[in-house]
Image (tube, rainbow, N blue to C red):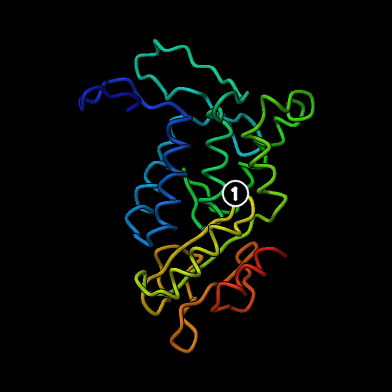
Amino acid sequence: LRVSRAGQVGSAPGMLEDYGNVISALLVLHAATGETSWLASAGELADVLMAEFSAGAVDSGGWYDAPADPDGLLSRRYTPSDNAYPSGGSAAAAALLTWSRLGFGAGGLESADLRRFCEARVLEQQGMMRRHPRFAGGWLAVLAALIAGPLELALVGPAADDRTVALRSAAFRAAPPGLAMARASGAGGDTAAPLLVGRTVVAGEPAAYVCRNSVCQLPVTTAADLTELLAE
């Protein structure tokens, strides 16, 4: 739902920008806290986004700004240009790109197809990015993430451990555009996100795995080493 006042939630449905921005926020919460509940909530919204707002197939179409109206009364349009904040399209592309890099799919698409869907939406806006970059800031941010890899980070270690905290802080400080981070508590090997499968602590120490397209480099256990890897 889109609005509330004085603690009372209104009836206006959430728009594309609402879903995209909230999904991104939930993924940041997971990266910051390691709580898997944020991933579950993000996944639910990603499925709704693809079901309610998609306007076409993987390689064509894009999105609508508004959800489907069962009564057919709502005129649906799509405004891709960004302004003071990201448009619905760029917000959705950013969120779903991160979601796909964690190894998840949405709306019946596997993770690889979901990434391809996001890439197609970015390519559709290349004319606007070239001619009117002032109104394409959100799209340019997603493009920067695609050019950067986008990189993925699997971070394994108890949330309260100072060594885990140091790795997490280094990741946030040095994060390249569009970094997708999945967290596992304890010794690792979690399946909360596909990116975490098989990623474990190293000799009892919290560890960070820097990956591209789910292919990971050797793990590091210090903030300095992680910062260096993310800067490459």
Front-most of 187 and 49? 187
Residue 54 coordinates in the image, percent (x, y) = 52, 31
Relative to 136, is 6 on the left or the right? left
Q: Quadrant of residue 7?
A: top left
| Crowding at mark 1 (Cα within 10 Å: few <14, some 14-19, many 20+) | some
Q: Which residue is mark 1?
A: 113
The image shows residue 181, relative to residue 188, as above or below, that is above
Residue 171 coordinates in the image, percent (x, y) = 55, 62
Residue 192 coordinates in the image, percent (x, y) = 39, 64
- Quarter of the image containing the C terminus? bottom right
Relative to 25, is 118 on the left or the right? right
Q: Quadrant of residue 117?
A: top right
Label 1 element class:
helix
The image shows residue 110, relative to residue 81, as above or below, that is below
- Quarter of the image containing the N terminus? top left
Front-most of 174 and 30? 174
Residue 165 coordinates in the image, percent (x, y) = 43, 68
Residue beneath the point at 60% across and 49% down: 113
**Which amino acid type is shown beneath numbered disc 1?**
Asp
Residue beneath the point at 60% across and 50% down: 178
